[in-house]
Amino acid sequence: MYASLLRENLPRVRDAIAEAALAAGRDPSEVTLVAVTKGHPPEAVSAALDAGLTDLGENRVEELEGKVARFRGAKVRWHMVGHVQGRKAARAAEVAQLIHSVDSERLAERIARSADESQRSVDVLFQVNTSGEQAKYGFSPAQAKERIPELAALSGLNARGLMTMAPLTEDEATLRLTFGRLRELSNDVRERFPTFGCELSMGMTNDLRFAVAEGSTMVRIGTALFGARG
Ligand SMILES: *Cc1c(COP(=O)(O)O)cnc(C)c1O
């Protein structure tokens, strides 16, 4: 079932990314498709791998650990895209190749400490709440400007860039503003911390076109690939 879903959906998603990129004068290959398998069984992961997807995302540490264990040895980069509780920081750092959702100073410090203790460093993105919605995790833009350049320097962290989540709306102006703010913030942070990475993780099923138009380098897509979650 997942194989046939992907046969239909993957070309559509790839076309949408390419179209939005070209319209913005960008090279579609600048945008990595992270297939979000959360809420779907291991068959979804198998089908994704068979379809040639190599970047897969999960939003809960337990589910990520389960799938990583099950697909050990497969050629896949696992992305942690959801909120990580402090007490699970070390576990997330252990299994994810990129944590998109470093959303507080405390979490940044905990991940850095656990990585440092095992003499590794972990690739991370800092999550910024550029929509201003109360319920969203992440640094405020003001905090981000002030604190992220310092946190990025922690031993144990490789700061690859920034991540944001847009509000649930179809309104183009709101979405573009939310994504555009992250791009501007990235320019700002990189001025102050030149080795800070330029990844911009933004765009989900409902807003991927606007995210790509505003400079996204990683879109995190679940529903448009695998259908609704149970
Ligand atoms: C679930 C999730 C996605 C994918 O959402 P869709 O709307 O299904 O594409 C992307 N990012 C995060 C952080 C998520 O939790």
Image (cartoon, rainbow, N blue to C red):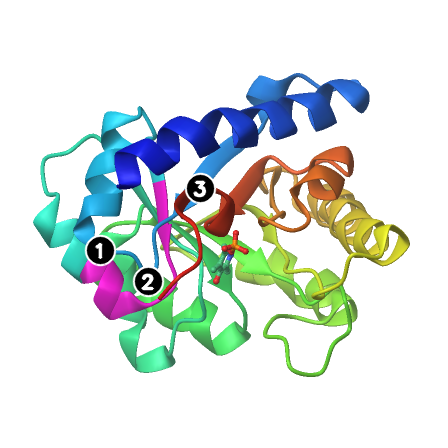
Query: Real-space Cα distance between discs 3 and 2?
Result: 13 Å
Q: Position of residue 213 (x, y in %)?
A: 77, 34
Q: Is residue 56 left or right of residue 168?
A: left
- Residue 212 lies in quadrant: top right
- In magenta segment, residue 116: no
**10 Å neighbourhood of mark 1: few (<14), some, or many (≥20)?**
few
- Which of 119/38 is in front? 38
Mark carried by residue 225: 3
Residue, x 9% and y 35% (percent of image)?
A: 73
Mark carried by residue 39: 2
The answer to whether the residue bearing label 3 lies less than 8 angstroms from the nearest atom of ligand 1 is yes
The answer to whether the residue bearing label 2 lies less than 8 angstroms from the nearest atom of ligand 1 is yes
Q: Which residue is mark 1?
A: 41
Mark 1 lies on a secondary structure that is: loop
- Assign the N terminus to one quadrant of the image: top left
Residue, x 74% and y 18% (percent of image)?
A: 22
Mark 3 lies on a secondary structure that is: helix
Mark 2 lies on a secondary structure that is: loop
